[in-house]
Amino acid sequence: MTSPATEVAFHFNAPDRTAYACRLLRKAVASGARVVVTGDSDTLQLLDAALWTFSATDFVPHCLLDSEPSVVAASPVILATSLQTVAHQQVLLNLGHGVPDGFERFERVIELVGMDEEERQLARVRWKHYTDRGHPITRHDLTLKTSA
C-alpha cells in the first residue's frame, strides 16, 4: 500500500514574505502543528530574528536545527537549511528557491511566494515538479485576501 501524496499549498503574492511567514507560523503553532521551515541560511536568520520581534504579544517557539537536541525535540518550529536530519514530518514551509530534498516525507508542504518576478518563475518550476509527481496542489492568492 502506498502512502498518500503530500499535500502542497502555494501562497502567492506575499508582499513581505518574512512577515507573512511569522503570521503563518503563529497560526500553525496555535493549532498544534509542528513545522519545519527550510530555506537558505540568510533567509532563516532573517526569519529567526523576525520571530522574536514581529508581535509584542505573541511568541512563536522556534529554534535552528543545530540547537541542542532537547531544544529541537521540544520546538514546534524548526529552521533548517537541510531536511536530512529533521524528525518533524507534519508541515514543511519552504522559503527556498528549489524543491527541498525529502519534502515527500511531510504531510503538507507550504510554498511561500513573494511578488518578485524571478521568485514567481522559480515557483512555477516547483509547481510543475509537484504536479508531475501527482501531488495535489492548492493555490492561495494573497492579493485576494484582506490583510490580517
Image: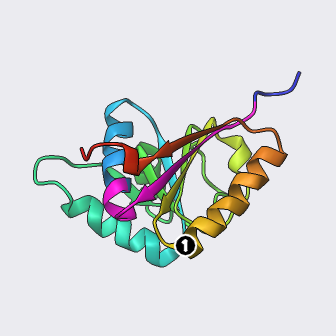
The image shows residue 46, relative to residue 99, as above or below, that is below
Q: Position of residue 117 (x, y in %)?
A: 54, 73
Could you tell me which quadrant the N terminus lies in? Answer: top right
The image shows residue 2, relative to residue 97, as above or below, that is above
Amino acid carrying label 1: it is Glu
Which residue does the image show at 64% across and 68% down from the upper left?
Answer: 121
Which residue does the image show at 31% across and 44% down from the upper left?
Answer: 26
Residue furthest left as drawn: 56
15 within the magenta span = yes
* Residue 104 falls in image quadrant: top right
Could you tell me which quadrant the C terminus lies in? Answer: top left
Which residue does the image show at 69% across and 37% down from the upper left?
Answer: 6
Q: Position of residue 41 (x, y in %)?
A: 50, 75
Q: Is residue 126 left or right of residue 24?
A: right
Question: Could you say whether the residue bearing mark 1 is in a helix, strand or loop?
Answer: helix
Residue furthest bottom as drawn: 42
Q: Which residues are magenta?
A: 5-20
60 within the magenta span = no
57, 15: nearer the viewer:
15
Can residue 29 be seen from the camera position used here? yes
* Residue 7 falls in image quadrant: top right
The image shows residue 129, relative to residue 105, as above or below, that is below
Q: Position of residue 63 (x, y in %)?
A: 39, 58
Q: Is residue 115 left or right of residue 30?
A: right
Mark 1, Cα crowd under 10 Å, few <14 / some 14-19 / many 20+, is few
Residue furthest right as drawn: 1
Which residue does the image show at 51% across and 60% down from the upper left?
Answer: 113
